[in-house]
Image: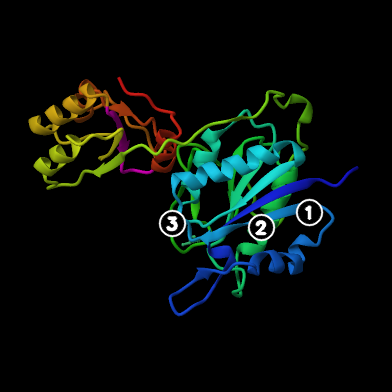
Amino acid sequence: MQKKRIYVAYTGGTLGMQPSPQGYQPVAGYLPKALQQLPQLQHSAIPDYQLQEYAPLLDSSDMQPKHWQQMANDIHARYDDYDGFVVLHGTDTMAYSAAALHYLLMGLSKPVIVTGSQIPLCEPNSDAPRNIRNAFYAAAYSPFAQVTLLFHHGLYAADSVSKVDAQQLQAFASINTEPLWQCDHTDWVFPARPSASLPSERLALGQVVEHRIAVLTLYPGVDIAWLCEQLAKPWYAVVLRTFGSGNAPQQPALLTALRDAHERGVILINRSQCWQGVENMTGYAGAHVLAQCGVQSAAGKPLEAIIAGLYCGQWSGR
Ligand code: ASP
């Protein structure tokens, strides 16, 4: 059987960083060489890979929607030449990029795996070797022909995952759904890829539009006048970080500002500050009033997927 071939887009992130007086920073040229020496990749089950190092390499805190488009364009342009794809990425905004790729690459019949690490490859006890090995393997053999985020013990659907821990190796969690796959030992063994049942449609490439988006967090004592001022601005969309199952203070001025924004065509989304659970627009009066002002439930999607979805045209207003 011919060896599988995967394409690896290395965008930056902790996994290829080195210490500097300013803290960890990506270093061009380091990771491609280090991977050639990595014992975890010297196994017959690891596919051949072609790695492209982006310039500049980014700490993912610097990632912008235009970078999501670049990654999607890259994969789209090479789609027919490889069996699967890996994006090596910083963990801080990895869930946003994974969600964006999920929306931009429509009709996938091959795996796209996004991964990174909490500890740089150059440090002892780094989680990079294992995540990289597992991601390379998954890009060749995962039965999930979609964009997934692979980290530590979990493989997560790209539109249902959040970074939930700044230090622990188990940095990501699945939001309102189970992980697609979990592994509590070192080897990832997937069921055989059901190639016959994969969709045969062609891959379509979506386009990012850099809309003006605001995220407004509610808290006890929040200045309602300030919120109203924000809502009066010409946003494309506003995400309200509400309480509990999607509740907000029932302040007439706030409700008027929301209604006016809705009338102007601003997309208004109700996303709870709770990670898990769904915004219920009819459970309490504090959410019912939001629905009456044109605010939509996020239906439990994580903020990362909401923001990526807004830039990728997944939401509509009135
Ligand atoms: N600041 C880093 C980044 O997101 C963190 C990481 O990769 O773990 O690029």
Secondary element at image label 1:
loop
Secondary element at image label 2:
helix
Magenta extent = 266-275
Q: Is residue 155 visible?
A: no
Residue 132 sits in quarter: bottom right
Residue 273 is labelled as none
Of badges 3 and 2, nearer the viewer stands: 3
Left or right, residue 48 beside residue 276: right
Circle 2 packing at 10 Å, graded few (<14), some (14-19), many (20+), is many
Q: Amino acid at mark 1?
A: Ile
Task: Tell which circle, 3 or 2, labels the residue nearer the N-terminal end.
Answer: 3
Circle 3 packing at 10 Å, graded few (<14), some (14-19), many (20+), is few
- The verdict on residue 267 being magenta is yes
Depth order, front residue of 215/20:
20
- Give the image location of residue 53, x and y in percent: 63, 58
Q: Which quarter shows the C terminus?
A: top left
- Give the image location of residue 215, x and y in percent: 29, 42
- The verdict on residue 130 being magenta is no
Q: Which residue is mark 2?
A: 132
Left or right, residue 201 beside residue 208: right
Separation of marks 3 and 2 at Cα, in angstroms: 22 Å
Magenta segment main secondary structure: strand
Q: Can you say whether 163 is above or below 111 in the image? A: below
Residue 46 is labelled as 1
Residue 62 is labelled as 3
- Give the image location of residue 207, x and y in percent: 50, 33
- Give the image location of residue 189, x and y in percent: 74, 47
Q: Amino acid at mark 2?
A: Ile
Q: Amino acid at mark 3?
A: Asp
Q: Can you say whether 69 is above or below 280 in the image? A: below
Separation of marks 1 and 2 at Cα, in angstroms: 10 Å
- Cβ atoms at labels 3 and 1 below 8 Å apart: no
